[in-house]
Amino acid sequence: PMGSDGCIDMEHPDNSGLPQDIWCDTCPLTQVYNNNFSHISKADFWIAAANAVIRIASNDELNLKNDYVSGRVDAESCVGQGARLPAASGCDAVEGVFVDRLGLTRTDAVALLGAHTIGRGNEDFSGHHGIWVDTEAQSVVWNKRYYEEFFRRAWIPRNQNDSAPQDWTWGGRNGDSPRFFLNTDLCLAFDIEATFPCCSDTTQRTNCDRNGQVLRNTQCASYPAGSPREEFANAVELFAGRRAGGGFSNDNTPFFSAFASAWGKATTNGLRDLVPLVSSLNSSSTRPQPSSVPTLGTGTANESPSVCDILYVPSVML
């Protein structure tokens, strides 16, 4: 199946940015799973863990508990699983994975790439260095800031003639918190294939002329009316929430709603017979309240914590 199958191909270069201690016999997260949650598949555990991270990082604004389903089966072999990720080359890769292979809409794809609002790239692993948002503090908050960055910055190409992979950076001072976009990011709002190299906002003239480039007169093109990729750009605009008079709204709802829908499709794709949490867990008055957080080395077959413990207890996953 093409959905979640409990696999991490740590040997694949696209996974080189993952910390080596994320999943191994002695890794903390693995031990939490082995000692407390091994009665469910790793695939189910990782989806529940991801949902918990999203809930925590969004300050409880996006709680996917009611959307959670279980019954995924772990694959016997993970060889080649990393190849299912989209390359950082551009929107051909985005469409190839999300639209053609998974059967999602382009709006779904834009919503899923909003996960770039948290995390960072590291030049020692992927070759891409920096964060997608403005500050380190913002890079651990789940909100729509990623989409705002498309329009806050004058993005110009970086590393065109270097050994490092080409991506995009802001022309202004980056300080200790370098900002960057991949081709697979910027192509969601601009037709960079038609106008490369270009600047995403030539009204910021001096910021377009950096890194030995003079791009103040080369605006990154918009997608023409009727282009299938116009849906990408429309979704970015919707999620960013730009106001007509300038600035951005504080409403995360369009992004959160679209992400919840797309995440549900992506994490159940190709799978059958998945079941939701039991109805008693949908009531805050009856939700389980563990007397203590499950700890390493505890838990037996008779007293294993439920998936609900992952969804309700943040410290289980931290």
Image: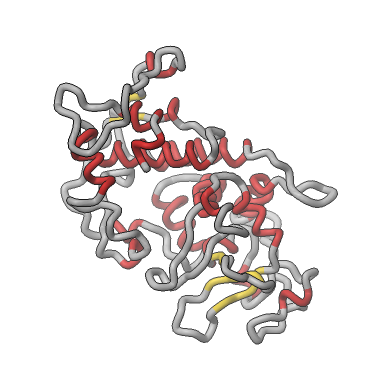
Please tell me which residue is depicted at 53% across the width and 33% down the height of the picture.
Answer: 60
Query: Where is 237 relative to 73, above or below?
Result: below
Number of marks in the image?
0
| Residue 25, image x, y percentages | 17, 51
Rendered-image quadrant of the C terminus: top left
The residue nearer to you, when weighing 61 against 224, is: 61
Q: Quadrant of residue 256?
A: top right
Could you tell me which residue is drawn at 69 percent across and 72 percent down?
172
- Decide if residue 46 is on the left or right side of residue 55: left
Q: For residue 208, what is the image quadrant?
A: bottom right
Is residue 63 shown above or below 125? above
Image coordinates for residue 18, horizontal then vertical, percent:
35, 59
Which residue sits furthest front?
292
Residue at (24, 46) in percent of width and height = 30
**Residue 114 image offset from top left, x and y in percent:** 54, 50
The answer to whether residue 265 is visible is no
Looking at this view, name the residue that lies furthest to the right: 245
168 relative to 286, above or below: below
Which quadrant, please, contains the N terminus? top left
x and y percent of residue 212 in the render? 65, 86
At a point 85% along the width and 49% down the height, the residue shown is: 245
Q: Using the rendered image of the protein, determine whether residue 100 is visible from the camera's viewpoint.
A: yes
